[in-house]
Image: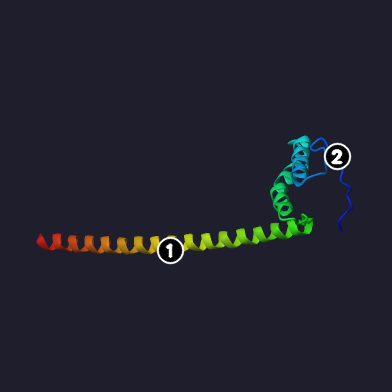
Amino acid sequence: MRLHVETHKTKHTKEHMTKQNEIDILLETAKKLGANSYCAGWLLDQIPQIESDMRSDMFPQTTWAESRRIQEQNIRDSQTQSEQILKHAKEKADKLVADAEKQSTQIRNRLERDLQHAINSL
């Protein structure tokens, strides 16, 4: 649902509100809210998308539900990525262990052979 907002004169312009004026107002508002605000950080995060939508002549449509959906997708993506990283790390660790066991066996066999040769030489 879009609210009807009348254009009006502001300190930003002597004429009607422009897209850039609106962005400037959003930035000023976020700054006025300050670092301890509940909304300032969120608003600053939203401004690039709002600005992009406005430049494309689209009304910003990000809703709380959309934000939640994006957040949930980011969490799923992060979980998938972390699972892949863990799987890759386990594969590498398993290979390192297998290589170490192989080398250990080769060293033991060489030592046994050298000891047996030394015993036989006595």
Picture residue at 76% right of the left edge, 40% below the top: 30
Q: Position of residue 81 (x, y in %)?
A: 57, 60
Q: With respect to residue 23, does 109 lie above or below?
A: below
Residues at discs 2 and 1 in contact (Cβ within 8 Å): no
Q: With respect to residue 56, does 7 lie above or below?
A: above
Residue 13's disc is: none
Question: Mark 2, mark 1: which one is toward the viewer?
Answer: 2
Lower sequence index among marks 2 and 1: 2
Residue farthest toward the front in the current orientation of the protein:
15
In the rendered view of the protein, which quadrant contains the C terminus?
A: bottom left
Q: Position of residue 36 (x, y in %)?
A: 76, 36
Picture residue at 39% right of the left edge, 60% below the top: 96
Element class at badge 2:
loop
Residue closest to the eye, 3 or 11: 11
Q: With respect to residue 122, does 23 lie above or below?
A: above
Element class at badge 1:
helix
Q: Which residue is mark 2?
A: 9
Q: Which residue is mark 1?
A: 94
Going by the numbered disc 1, the residue's amino acid type is Asp
Going by the numbered disc 2, the residue's amino acid type is Lys
